[in-house]
Amino acid sequence: MTWRSIREWYDGAFLPWLEATLPEGTFLGSPAARWLIAAAVLAAAFLVLRTAKAIVVRRVRRISERTETRWDDGFLEVLQTTRNWFLLAVAIWLASLPLALPERAANVVRTALVLVALLQAAFWGSALLTFVITGYVRRRSDEDAATVTTISALGFVARLALWSIVALLMLDNLGVDVTALVAGLGVGGIAVALAAQNILGDLFASMSIVLDKPFVIGDFIIVGDMMGTVEHVGLKTTRLRSLSGEQLVFSNNDLLSSRIRNFKRMYQRRIVFGVGVTYDTPPEKLRAAADELKQAVEAQEQVRFDRAHFKSFGPSSLDFEVVYFVLSADFNLSMDIQQRINLRLVERFAELGVEFAFPTRTVHLARE
């Protein structure tokens, strides 16, 4: 049996019998028989839609419990926000199809369905945004609390924008001229933006910090001539704890417009230091001193030697320059290594008979 044969039976046999059985008369352009059919369609459609929703929700929940992905959980949360009044609105629209409603009544039904669909779409979108933001907050709450705060605030802004768009679409479907309203909001938004441009600049800078991540909480950074460890990244300001203990507060916009040196992301340190010996040191001891400088560096662990040279003739010393790399970003480790190198040089130069230079000045007195 095809749909066409069912339709022919309905129009040719069932509907005439039903119209002959029921009382005569029409309401809103449709006889009582069609209203009875519409009521049956309404009840059946609402029951079928609710049953289908329950079945789909149950199956998606089973799938989400067996898998480790998060997107099926998100789909389940979005699906669960489907409201019964939305299903009822769809059922009413289906029930109105057999009726020969006047144009005005049909437009009312269609407009009501569109409004309800827009409202339901707003609930779906809000649930999806909430799911994404909640998942991000759950993953990052322990390691980056400030970013979590910023993302939560941006999520509120996104939901506000979503509901604002839905409200404008609903007003437009109700026949309200939203063009003037949008234009007024645009002018008002420009005025607010001009009045709060510093705040908005810091807000967008905060978004840039969160998304681009030039630094995160716990990083040691230098901004201009100020330095400290990042403690908090807010919507307007970023706060550092300096080495001397006080808190440094930067506006996000000023911070991003400055040159930032992030020492937390160093993977090695380049160390350059110099040694000066006296001018009366003979050439053979200068060569031995250069070799000893190289050996003192290579004897250390977590170090890569670069060079050691007799660099220049200073005002009161013969100057050597040594360059090496500490294969770690730990500042304390680099200072421990430098200390061991210095102590070894003191011992070995004493054994070689090489004297460290200190600032001296020779004054020649002439008698007339």
Image (cartoon, rainbow, N blue to C red):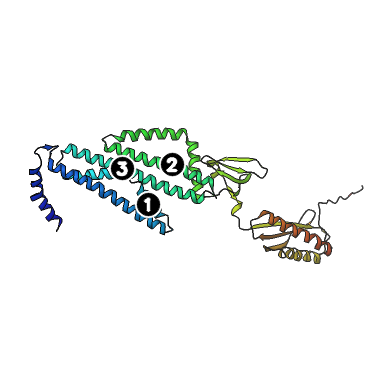
Q: Position of residue 45 (x, y in %)?
A: 23, 48
Q: Residue furthest right?
A: 367
Element marked by disc 1? helix
Q: Which mark is residue 118?
A: 3
Q: Is residue 312 visible?
A: no
Q: Position of residue 176 (x, y in %)?
A: 28, 34
Element marked by disc 3? helix
Q: Is residue 260 left or right of residue 111?
A: right
Image quadrant for the N terminus? bottom left
Q: Nearer the viewer, residue 166 or 117?
A: 117
Q: Which callout, 2 or 3, points at the residue further toward the start of the chain?
A: 3
Element marked by disc 2? helix
Q: Which callout, 2 or 1, points at the residue further toward the start of the chain?
A: 1
Q: Nearer the viewer, residue 2 or 132?
A: 2
Mark 2–mark 3 Cα distance, whole angstroms, equals: 19 Å
Q: Nearer the viewer, residue 222 or 134?
A: 134
Q: Is residue 285 visible?
A: yes
Q: Position of residue 25 (x, y in %)?
A: 9, 37
Q: Which residue is mark 2?
A: 156
Q: Residue furthest front?
A: 21
Query: What's the amino acid at mark 2?
Result: Phe
Q: Is residue 41 left or right of residue 248?
A: left
Q: Which residue is mark 1?
A: 76
Query: What's the amino acid at mark 3?
Result: Leu
Q: Which callout, 1 or 3, points at the residue further toward the start of the chain?
A: 1
CB atoms at circles 2 and 1 under 8 Å apart? no
Q: Is residue 143 left or right of residue 2?
A: right
Query: What's the amino acid at mark 1?
Result: Leu
Q: Position of residue 236 (x, y in %)?
A: 52, 39
